[in-house]
Amino acid sequence: MTDFRKLFKPVDGNAREREPQVHQADFSSPAPSSTPYGRKEGMTIDTNPTVQEVRSTYVTLYTCHTRITGYLHSSHSRPTDMLNTLDQDFVVVHEAIAQALQATTAEGMQAASMLVRKDNIMIAIPRDRRIGAEQAPARQGLKVERIPVKATVEAWPFSIEGDLHLAPGVAVLQHVRDPHHAFMAVTDARVSYHPSPLLGFQAPFVVVNRRNVQLVVEASEIGQPDPDVAEPETANTEISGIRAAELLAETEVFKQVPLPELQRISTQLCESGRACRILYKAGSEVFHQGDAGDTLYVIESGHLEVTLRDTHRGGEKRLAYLGPGDFFGEMAVLGERRRTATVRAVTDVSLLALQEQAVTTLLQEFPSATSTMLGIMVERQSELAGSGLNMAA
């Protein structure tokens, strides 16, 4: 069986994007006469045929699980027209880079060209505004003026909020069911990716595959939110044992533990529910000084601040600033039982949360990590004592 991975070249996910190009197919020059197909005596050749302009537009395509960036080649200037006028079942993406949406690393796969089935494309986004750039349909001088209608489009696993652009007299349902155009435009779009909320993004223009739309709701049909009901600041999601082990291996405590062994234990903890991923919005508190605590956290992404209450002057004093690879919350889990400081999300953050039983299991399985953990706890206790602040709850 052919190993298709050998056909691709790994590439760093931070690879620079190339400038879009414009190619011209020039048929005016005859082949050299030295070849069997060159001009022969008495042959008449049109040296001034119509030159067809081929545009290269840089785009990002999203399938359910993959993000693909590269160039579409077409005589059309707009990606919407490119996708809607192609009769083939596949789209050819040139100089393509493909990345799994929930990959644990930034690496992807690169190829000179990739075939992507059109039905599998959920969303397409033009990335360049100079060549082949899309504008809102109402601004393009169309023969039929378009009416923007705010709506939410569900195309699992994506949710897109933005403006649809309808012809006068056309209802939203008719617009979505248009049998002649597989892709429709949504402007001022806010895109959510349900399996991982942190992968959501905003874009001035996206193209959505009508065939994959399961639900469309006009904004006028959505009830006004209850002002007394606050938007949730946290969300719990599953995490794989492999990913949990990778996060633990980035910490000072477990970096010396063999990764296969760490993966084995982490998988057991994740499957039993003693370890999970928790998302916090910027400005929300993970815990407050004086609270009871039974969870240790490892930072997957984002930044948090650790503050202490100043009972003499009032207010708070920042003690530490934490980022990916750092952990916190161990004092309440292993000794104090009460949170000795307040930890607050400075940005949106993703955390690996380990319940007390999970921490105990890890330290029992890997005794060498215990001494490292205790050493870090002693250092942090010293920092707290040297802060000169009252740590009483």
Image (cartoon, grey):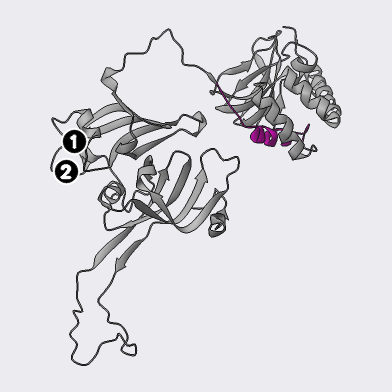
Query: Based on the displayed image, in which of its 4 quarters is residue 177 positioned?
Result: top left
Q: Residue at x 79, y 17 (%)?
A: 334
Left or right of residue 331: residue 214: left
Callout 1: SS? loop
Q: Can residue 373 be seen from the camera position used here?
A: no
Query: Based on the displayed image, in which of its 4 quarters is residue 47 positioned?
Result: bottom left
Using the image as rendered, state which of residue 110 and residue 156 is in the foreground. 156
Label 1 and label 2: CA atoms lie apart by: 8 Å
Left or right of residue 127: residue 16: right
10 Å crowding of disc 2: few (<14), some (14-19), many (20+): few
Q: Can residue 11 be seen from the camera position used here?
A: yes
The correct choice, above or below, for 237 with respect to 314 in the image is below
Q: Residue at x 44, y 9 (%)?
A: 229
The picture places residue 307, in percent across and down from the top left corner, at 67, 18
Residue that label 2 marks: 142
Residue 146's label in the rendered image is 1
Residue 334's label in the rendered image is none
The correct choice, above or below, for 375 with respect to 145 in the image is above
The picture places residue 220, in percent across and down from the top left corner, at 26, 19
Left or right of residue 342: residue 72: left
Question: The disc labelled 2 sits on which kind of residue?
Answer: Leu
The picture places residue 270, in percent across and down from the top left corner, at 65, 26
| Residue 243 drawn in magenta | yes
Q: Are marks 1 and 2 in contact (CB under 8 Å)?
A: yes
